[in-house]
Image: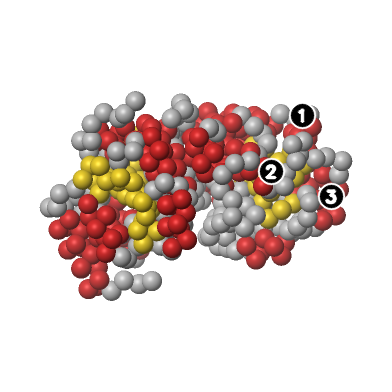
Amino acid sequence: MRVGPLARLRTGVSYVLGRFGRRDPGTWVFGNQKGFRDNPRYLAEHVAHHHPDVEVWWIARREGEAAAARDAGLRAALRGTQEAAGVQRRAAAAFLSNGFQDLQPEHLGGAFVVDLRHGKGLKRVLLDMDDKRPTSWWRTPLAALQAWWIRRRLGRISLIVAPGEMARQMYLSAYGTDPSRVQILGSPRFDVIEGGDAFERASGGDLRARLGVHGDDYVVLWLPTWREAGDAAWLPRLDAQTLDGCLDGTRIVLLAKPHPFSDEAVYRERLPEGPRLRLLPEADVDANCLLRVADALVTDFSSAAFDFALLDRPLHFFVPDIDDYRGGKGLYEPLDTISGGSHHTDWPSLLAAVRDAAAGTDATGLANARRTLARGGLNAEPGSSERIYRVVASSIGLGPADD
């Protein structure tokens, strides 16, 4: 939706005035335009459960989302209401992961804004995206103006949380910022993927049982990333005969979960659903909880590759459209950096690799995972959410964290 000049002016004035107001270090506000999920949710739940003196608020877009937040022990307000505006104007700390529209930026002037991000894979983001770079003489002024505007907005972020050293270096460039604003603290996702209380809160119990997966099934999770050109341009058709022929005699179950922005209709049209392959509705199951219970992962340039590498389980790369990314187009570095050249471009090749890894006759998948983990330089020490809490609490003068 386009925003008119008067609306932009009102937003700017409101933001500037907010810088002169008093903010409460004991009030923290969280949001995610994709719903009650991912890093903002995980961190909000951690703070609510382990630091009850902090008033934790979730800004929801729908009543169902607000109800889910309340059920998780958070306070919730609906975006666009006076209550939501008041909470955001009062909060000393504000958390987002997909950009300022996770919350209402006009109310965040003077707040300590934390960008938790939604993972970091190989694809370029923000100022580093290919469409932000000058490609000809007439685009140079336009690209420069666009970059200036993005850099100006990004300058309002106080802390950028990086999961590892690779991501930190990419963020320094993507945000056009100085090193002091980017800290390698891990990721709230890691707490879920590594198991424990964070996983139990997000998963709601025995996830494999709820998915109808048996104890001796070998679960392969497929998490493809979003393609800007659409899924019809890259997703190859898989017929039931090929699937059964490759996996016959195994206990392999393939769970496919498209990206939130993907065209699910394309997946349903091109994949044979049945006992061996199930397409999971995007909003039904938490992707990071699925990583925890999966025996192997299939992905591409996604941050899921780095997240899953923490578990030291087989990792397979499926990139039928790899030629579209040759020469580093759209990427910070070639996929070979983490795949070692062992990626797959067709279904028979991928399914054979999955079958061999499940049988323990091929260690290529484990080699991929270990190569990816090493390249990411991840802060894998347990307690990412608590580390983030302590840094933020100290930054806004809340005092030392509770033991």
Foreground of the two, 63 or 322: 63
How far is disc 3 from disc 1 in space, using C-alphas? 20 Å
Sequence-earlier tag: 3 or 1: 3
Amino acid at pointer 2: Ala
**For this view, does 143 lie left or right of residue 308?**
left
Instruction: Report how far apart the C-alphas of labels 1 and 2 lie in the structure.
Output: 25 Å
Q: Residues within 10 Å of mark 2 (few under 14, many from 20)?
A: few
Q: Indicate the amino acid at tag 1.
A: Gly
Task: List the residue tagged with mark 2.
Answer: 209
Residue at 31% in and 56% down: 150
- Mark 3 touches mark 1? (CB < 8 Å): no
Return the x and y of residue 102 as percentages of the image width and height.
Answer: 37, 56
Q: Earlier in the sequence, mark 3 or mark 2?
A: 2
Dividing the picture into quadrants, the one containing residue 63 is bottom left
Residue 219 percent coordinates (x, y): 71, 41
Can you tell which mark lies on residue 270? Answer: none
Mark 1 and mark 2 lie on one chain; the one further toward the N terminus is 2
In this rendering, position of residue 209 left or right of residue 70:
right
Q: Is residue 392 above or below residue 62?
A: above
Pointer 3: what residue?
A: 244
Question: Residue 93 location, x and y as percent?
Answer: 27, 45
The residue wearing badge 1 is 360
Q: Residues within 10 Å of mark 3 (few under 14, many from 20)?
A: few
Marks 3, 2: nearer the viewer: 2
Q: In the picture provided, is 363 more to the left or to the right than 28?
A: right
